[in-house]
Each structure stands twice: as C-alpha cells, then as structure tokens.
Amino acid sequence: RLSDKICIFVHILIFIVKNKDIKKWDFSIEFPAFKKFYRTTMIKNIKFAKKLSLLVLFALLFYSANSQVNHDFYIKTVDIKGNNKTKTETILRELTFSEGDSISKKELLQKTEESKKNLQNTPLFNFVDINILNDSTSNIEIEINVEERWYLWPQIAVYYADRNFSNWIKNRDFTRTDFGAGLEKYNFRGRNEKLSFYSIFGYDEELMLNYRDIFIDKNRQHSIGIFLKQLKRKETGCKIENDKLTQIKLQNEYALKSYSLSVKYSYRKDFYNSHSIYYGFENRKLSDSLLFFSPDYTVNSQTEINYFFLKYIFKRDKRNSRIFPTEGHYIKITTVKNGLFLLPEDEINSFYIKSEFSKYTKLSEKLYLGNHITVKFKANNKTAFFLNSGIGYNSNIRGYEYYVVNGTNFALTKNTLNFKLIPKKVIYLKKIPFKRFNKIHFTVYASIFADAAYVKNSDISYSQTNILDNTLLYSSGLSLNILTYYDALLRLDYSINHLKERGFYLHFEAPF
C-alpha cells in the first residue's frame, strides 16, 4: 500500500539522519522485520526498490554536502612556545586534545578553551594563549604560547601566629609574630613539581621540608610526595572558653614539641578527578603545665603521644580558576583515621569524614553566583583536643573570625553574589626589564554574601563555658575582592553576625 511505502521512506530517512556513520548502518537490527519486508516487497516490486535506492543516494549526497560545512578538522601539529623551563610533556598532560585527533569545529573551540583553563590553573604560567592555524580546508595547526612565571622564591617573611589575620590584628600582641627564611622551587625539574624548605623562628620554631607532585609514570597519572615537619612552641592553644581559643604560654620550657613524617600517593587519570592517600606518623611531647591547664588536650593525660594516621582525599575540580572561581564546580571528600593501633602506647582513636561541594554559576557577563556546602561527621568517641576541630580552623563562617566552635558534627553553607566591577586589566611596566615581572594584571569584584552554620556538641562540660555550639550561626555582609599578579587575592569583608556584631575583616584567600 502507498501508506506503508511512505512510512518506510520516512523511517529510513530518519534512520539515515540519526546515523551519520555509514559503517555502523545495520538495517536488520534497526528494522527487525526488514528481511521480511525485503522478501515480500523489494524483490516483488522492482520499481519501488529503484525508488528506494534513489532516495538513499540523495540522502547520502545531502550528508556529503552537509559534512563539508560541519566536517571534522585534523590536528596536524601542536606547537608550544615560551616554555623555556617547563617540559613539553608537562604541558601536553593538561591538553584535552592531541596531535592526530579528528575533531569537529564545535568540539575544537570547546577543547581549546578547556585546555587553556587547565594550563592557567597550574602554578606555572602568567598568561596562556591558544591559536588555531589553518593550512588547508581540513588540516589545522595549534599554536600554544605560554609566559612562564618566576619559579624560585627565597622565603624571607613575617608570619602572624594566629588562626587568621583579623584575629592577630585584634589581639594587638605583635610579639605573636614569627620570622621565616626558606626556599620554594616551583616547577622543579620542569615537571610541575614543588620543592619547599622553611625554617621559622621567633614566637614559634618550625622546620618543614616538602617535595610533592613527583610523577612516577610517563602518562603523569601517578605521583608521590614526601612531607617532614618539626614544631616547637612555648605558647599553644589548648582549650576553648567563651567560644574563643585560650592559649597557655610558658617562659622557660616548650609547651609543645612535635614532629611528623608522611608520604602521599596520588592518582589522576583524567583532567578533573584525583585520588590521594596520605600515610604518616606523628610524635607529640607535652609539658606537665600544658596537661595541668588543659587535661582534655589528650585522652589519657600522657605527656608523649605517638600515633599513625591514614587519610584519603577525592577531588573533582572543574572551576575556571583556583584562586577566585566564577564558573564550574568543586567537590572534595576527605576521610581521616587517626590512630591505627600499630604502637602499644597509641591512645589516639578518631575517625571523621568531611564533604565539601561548591557551585559557581555565571548569570551574566558581570554577575556570578557562588554556593558552597560543607558537612562533617565524626565518630562519637572521645577525641584529643588537638584533633577535635570544628568551625574556626580550616572551615569557617564569615563574621565569626574571632570565634572557635568545636563539636562532633557540623554543617555550613556559604553563598555569594559577585559583581565584576573592573574586568581583567593588563598593565605593562616598561621600566622593569624583567619579562616575568613587567606585565601584571588585576580584576576587581564586589560581593554580597550570606552564610550559616550549625555545630553539634554533646559534651556537657564544653557547653557550660561556650554558647555557640548547638546554635544556628548566621551572618551576611559585603565584600571587595582584588585579584592580581601571581595568584594574589586581597579580600575585605564587612559583616554582621547573629550576635549583631559588626566588623571589617581582611583575608588573603577566596571564601570557598
């Protein structure tokens, strides 16, 4: 019948449109009754068979013409310029394309943009440009121009001996200052490895040696790191009273001495996901005065603590910037077990899991929304004070810079609306002869924000001297963010919290 023939024509046309790859055509699978149709209709009706063949021919010609417009490009070469120190394979590892790839125009533009972001998110380059050059209708050459940073940094600096800069300024005790000397070598051996050595003296005495991101395979998927740290303090935080960290300070002896050694193994199969495992050991020696002042600093009031620890971290990072992201998302899941019971004197036994999720959305050319959630769950067993951190350490809420809230579990959310006041500006300093320093950039964002958090604490004695646990904490305010050269960020916040306390706070990193 005519209607049956029309249906068959339409069906085959749809099939051809959906399946551009002729090698994958299989009518017997697409049409289970195709064999029966062939025997009953095609063989008996020669005219219809000819018409059908002509229709298929026209469809192929149509696709051939269409493919001339949306044809695949063949990447003939990838040429990298400006990498005087950085190994070529280090740069190639961050590219989402490679020589010999066939790629459509749409995918090409997307992959070059992703590759540029990947390179800019390494601490290797100040500027990255990717150009596409045509030498024919289908063959292309990709040229990547990078401007390398300065990688060797002597460290002569002053450090504040507090949880954050605002807290240090408020205390106005400038004796709580450390002086440090050391050396940082970024892009060590041209492989994006980092070797650092610090010696800190003054208020605290600290010695650190770190060598990380040492790749051990040709595909740069497996890497290791080594971390060594020694610390001596005459003053250290040891309890929380009135929701603030209380310090003990000794004159003639160290309140705390410790050293730790850990190794790290990381696996990064693709560009955005990574898995890391830390295995380490720590020794802590405590003064009798510290234990007398804070009996809960340890579990069994021992003056010497030895324990092993195991940590696993998963990261998924699709942000457009590590320093001040405005698009993409970031996921981090951390699992830590302190105390593996490998030593007879091991009194440490704690476990927690912490999940962090950040989402960055571009609303317009100048308006960006950021949302963040952190949730931490800790096994409900007695934990030494120095391992029981909540809000006010690595996780914080704006407007509560002066406070510390400990507990077994907590949840917090941060929400920011960023407005780009000044787009990225590049300034050339002609009087500076050094190429790595005479071209700087800066961007300015204005922000409004609202944060909230809740910390659960079942310790009755803790709640007798503190009021911020088991209470909804919330704050809001305004912020000015200046992003500039060498990943430097200056952030000035004005906020008000649920205690109706107002204040200005200075930070040197993004809120999340």
Image (cartoon, rainbow, N blue to C red):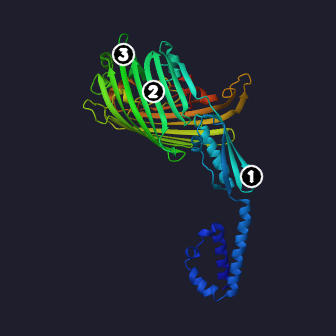
What is the quadrant of residue 35 in the picture?
bottom right
Residue designated by label 3: 254
Category of crowding for the residue at label 1, using alpha-carbon neighbours closer than 10 angstroms: few (below 14), some (14–19), many (at least 20): few
First-in-chain label (1 vs 3)? 1
What is the quadrant of residue 290 in the picture?
top left
Residue designated by label 2: 209
Q: Is residue 362 left or right of residue 398?
A: right
Q: Position of residue 227 (x, y in %)?
A: 43, 30
Residue found farthest to the left? 344
Q: Position of residue 24 (x, y in %)?
A: 59, 69
Residue found farthest to the top? 252
In the picture, the disc for residue 135 is 1
Category of crowding for the residue at label 2, using alpha-carbon neighbours closer than 10 angstroms: few (below 14), some (14–19), many (at least 20): some
First-in-chain label (2 vs 3)? 2
Q: Is residue 279 visible?
A: yes
Question: What is the C-alpha distance between the residues marked 2 and 1?
Answer: 50 Å
